[in-house]
Amino acid sequence: MKVKGIVGGLVALFALSSVLWAADCVEVDIEAPQVAYLGQTVVLSGELTNCGDEAEFVELSGFITNGVDTLHSPAVSLYLAAGETKSRAVSIHIPNVPQLVGTYTACVVARIGTAESTDCATMQILEGGRKPVNTQERKIR
């Protein structure tokens, strides 16, 4: 009888500990433009998934770096139910500073509880902007 009580107690303790120690899990998948220009605001967008067992707030932040210069986005928080996926974006302004021209890694970091996920893409920052689009229609005679 004592063995059954001990085994039952261990099973109950294990079940309780798995609830108390539910694993946090988050996944992020981003899309970033391949080319950006000085003076432009870049949008890094993507999907966030709470792959954990409980609903929680997710903190999302982005950065662009070349190993020397790093530009950051403000952090964004959102609530995700367990198993839920939502699309979100962060914006990063690229100052009009010629020294920033070059190849960068654009990343988004998602944090939920003790879990963290990062997804990155390569981006070129170029000098000068895009040519303005002519919005006036020309009549051909």
Image (tube, grey):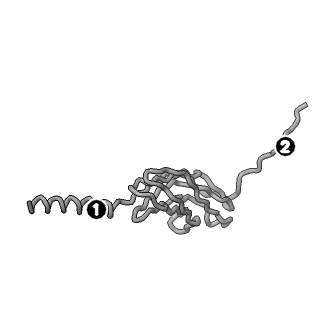
Distance from disc 2 to disc 1, alpha carbons, whole Å, reads 69 Å
In-front residue for pair 78/115: 78
Q: Residue at x 62, y 57 (%)?
A: 42
- Crowding near the residue tagged with mark 2, few <14, some 14–19, many ≥20 C-alpha atoms within 10 Å: few
Q: Residue at x 28, y 62 (%)?
A: 16
Residue 97, quarter of picture: bottom right
Which quadrant, please, contains the N terminus? bottom left
Q: Position of residue 138 (x, y in %)?
A: 86, 38
Q: Position of residue 83 (x, y in %)?
A: 43, 51
Q: Is residue 66 left or right of residue 5?
A: right
Q: For the residue marked with disc 1, what is the amino acid? A: Leu
**Which mark sits nearer the N-terminus, 2 or 1?**
1
Q: Residue at x 66, y 57 (%)?
A: 37
In-front residue for pair 127/16: 16
Which quadrant, please, contains the C terminus? top right
The disc at residue 77 is none
Up-down relation of residue 136 to residue 116 (above or below): above
Is disc 1 placed on a helix, strand or loop?
Answer: helix
Tag 2 residue: 136
Farthest-out residue, front: 1
Answer yes or no: do the residues labelled 2 and 1 have beta carbons within 8 Å? no
Q: Is residue 91 left or right of residue 133?
A: left
Tag 1 residue: 16
Farthest-out residue, right: 141
Q: For the residue marked with disc 2, what is the amino acid? A: Gln
Farthest-out residue, top: 141
Q: Position of residue 33 (x, y in %)?
A: 59, 51
Q: Is residue 27 left or right of residue 97?
A: left
